[in-house]
Image: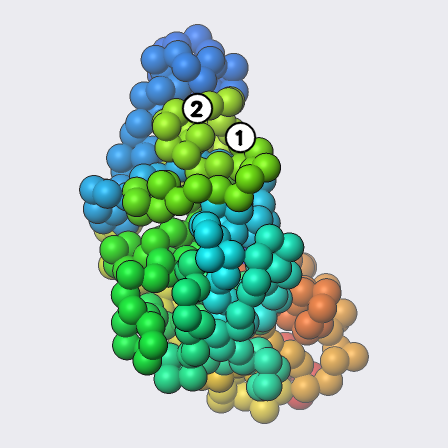
Amino acid sequence: MRKTYNFSAGPAVLPEEVLEQAREEMLDWHGSGMSVMEMSHRGKEFMSIMDKTESTLRELADIPAGYKILFLQGGALSQFAMVPMNLLGESGKADYVQTGQWSEKAINEAARYGSVHIAASSESDGFNSAPPLAQWKISPGTAYVHYTTNETIGGVEFQWIPDLSAIAGSDKTIPLVADMSSNFLSRPFDVSKFGLIYAGAQKNVGPAGLVLVIIREDLLDVAPLSGTPTMYRYKTYADNASMYNTPPTYAIYIMGLVMEWLKKQGGLAAIEQRNIAKARLIYDLIDASSFYHCPVNRADRSRMNIPFTLSDSSLDEVFLKQAQTHGLLQLKGHRSVGGMRASIYNAMPLEGVQALAAFMQEFERNHA
Ligand SMILES: *Cc1c(COP(=O)(O)O)cnc(C)c1O
């Protein structure tokens, strides 16, 4: 058993059972005489790992027929380009919801390829909320609407899935595109509401180097912008079962172990309940205190990433140092925000959050 708890925003904590199983199988996977890292991606051993990983994900997230699961590389940032390159189509226009640093990066990248319209923004309140659907304005002829389900840096999470057909002048045939990198599989979600979902693995599902795309099949028929490289076309992955080139085999294997672990936890509905309980522990403590502060609008607070500040920022370094000696690692806030950030993804056990809460209370008693 490890004696530390890792609150990193990503790459982030993985379930200890998963790491132990990987260690056991490191030199010889299931009697094959090979490490997963040494296998041909087209051999029957790795093919079975990949098939199982995909089918378990499909089962866990209840991904309907008519949606393809793709395994890619290049992180979520490459999706910031790949989405517009593949989906802008003839209209060349896309709508984006601006809620913080990750959505802004997505917007800036999309603007290199087409005309971007900001459908809604929370800039006026310092990106501390999720703009209500009533404020969204969809531009006519838009190719898709993109939003970030959880702003990892700001700690703002949409607790609802936007229903585009409820917006005047819009309709439900407009594909909804979501960057789910930091709350993917942290709760049940209705895939059929989306045209495309992408998620970098290193927050909630596995090691860095793997990015998942779930795409509605009709979107594979949109012609990519001319000049789109082969490796930047979704169809390349869809037509070749994500094996056009060598996929990130070891990352896929670890993701497969995480999927099995999630199943054993009771699936997404069960993990959601645990995530709610974990987040509540820290937010309740912050709200009951005048020493700690979280700037995010209560209804839009992230269950995955909790940014908070101390009333006296000159204590930040002391807080981090003492946390470290208590085995509470990587609590430093994003360099752009300062303060602290506790990322409590699926793999963070309740005990880790309880340890953080106890430390925060003790620190407040000693310094308030
Ligand atoms: C971490 C993160 C990214 C960037 O992912 P990379 O894998 O580093 O490219 C993008 N969007 C969100 C919401 C993230 O949390």
- Above-or-below relation of 345 to 280: above
What secondary structure is found at the residue carrying circle 1?
helix
Crowd rating for badge 2 (residues with CA inside 10 Å; few <14, some 14–19, many 20+): some
Q: Going by the picture, which residue comes out furthest to the front? A: 90
Q: Is residue 231 left or right of residue 71?
A: right
Task: Decide which of 26, 192 is in the foreground and name it.
Answer: 192
Labels in figure, total? 2
Residue 46 in which image quadrant: top left
Residue 333 in which image quadrant: bottom right
Q: Amino acid at mark 1?
A: Thr
Q: Going by the picture, which residue comes out furthest to the bottom? A: 290
Q: Looking at the rendered structure, which numbered label has been put on residue 35?
A: none
Residue for badge 1: 230
Can I make out residue 268 in this image? no
Q: Is residue 258 left or right of residue 4?
A: left
Residue for badge 2: 243
What secondary structure is found at the residue carrying circle 2?
loop
Which residue lies at the image location 44% right of the left edge and 38% below the top edge? 234
Question: Residue 52: x, y in percent?
Answer: 29, 29
Q: Amino acid at mark 2?
A: Met
Eye-nearest disc, 2 or 1:
1
- Above-or-below relation of 18 to 306: above
- Above-or-below relation of 130 to 328: below
Q: Is mark 2 within 8 Å of ligand 1?
A: no
Which residue lies at the image location 59% right of the left edge and 80% below the top edge? 123
Crowd rating for badge 1 (residues with CA inside 10 Å; few <14, some 14–19, many 20+): few
Q: Going by the picture, which residue comes out furthest to the top? A: 33
Which residue lies at the image location 37% right of the left edge and 32% below the top edge? 238
Question: Residue 168: x, y in percent?
Answer: 32, 80
Sequence-earlier tag: 2 or 1 = 1
